[in-house]
Amino acid sequence: MDIKAFEDGLKNDLHKYLVSVGRVDKILPETPDLEDMWTAVRDAYLPDGVKEFADYPVVSLGWMMFLGMAAAKYWDTDWEKYSAEGGAAIYTRLRDEKGYDNLDDNILENVLGLKGEEAEKTSEIVGECASRTLSYLQHSSVEAGTAEAAECYLAALHDLFIMGGAMELNALGYHMTPVGMN
């Protein structure tokens, strides 16, 4: 399987869904700062994410989207401070504050400042994205437990991280619109 094609196909599916529910624009933001943080977040997250995937695959996938949201919020708040902290330290801190099982609630409440209906709606959207991603993985014709399956899982986590970041940037008022050429 072509991993790039897998990742691009999943990204397109997630993007279309998020546009349809008004959580991202038709043009996704370019996020080099989040991309720079991605590898460290991924490496710190993998031991927990892989362990949870067997019994809780939607959680394993969805938590990465919440991490993308947190990274985008930190970018908007004080990127100099948070980028110096580093992606691995940020993930570890967020996980340890309330535990892995409560990572979503911790990010929603303490990082994004969401409560009530808006927190619930955001959780539903993340859950839908994670479920779509799981379905995409399951229908990819990649044999579970192989190196190729691991590459697809990593590609899926990357897409979810970036889409989470795009979703939060949109919520913060960063909107991507085409620029006319006159």
Image (cartoon, rainbow, N blue to C red):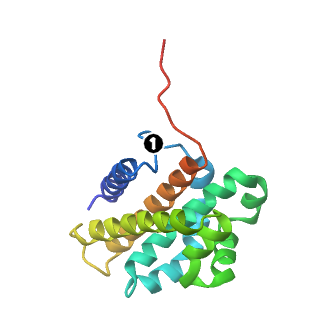
* Residue 61 appears left or right of 20: right
In the displayed structure, would residue 85 be above or below residue 30?
below
Identified at 54% across, 39% down, the residue is 175
Give the residue type that dot 1 points to. Asp
Identified at 52% across, 43% down, the residue is 29
In the displayed structure, would residue 54 be above or below residue 166?
below
Image spot of residue 88 (x, y percent) = 65, 71
The quarter of the rendered structure image containing the N terminus is: bottom left
Image spot of residue 9 (x, y percent) = 30, 54
Number of on-image labels = 1
Q: Residues within 10 Å of mark 1 (few under 14, many from 20)?
A: some
Identified at 79% across, 58% down, the residue is 81
In the displayed structure, would residue 96 be above or below residue 12?
below
The extreme top residue here reads 182
* Residue 14 appears left or right of 112: left
In the displayed structure, would residue 131 be above or below residue 19?
below
Q: Which residue is mark 1?
A: 25
Using the image as rendered, state which of residue 109 and residue 135 is in the foreground. 109
The extreme front residue here reads 117
Using the image as rendered, state which of residue 115 and residue 5 is in the foreground. 115
Identified at 42% across, 67% down, the residue is 124
Image spot of residue 169 (x, y percent) = 57, 49
Image spot of residue 118 (x, y percent) = 53, 62
Using the image as rendered, state which of residue 82 and residue 127 is in the foreground. 127
Corner quadrant of residue 38 = bottom right
Label 1, secondary structure: give it: loop
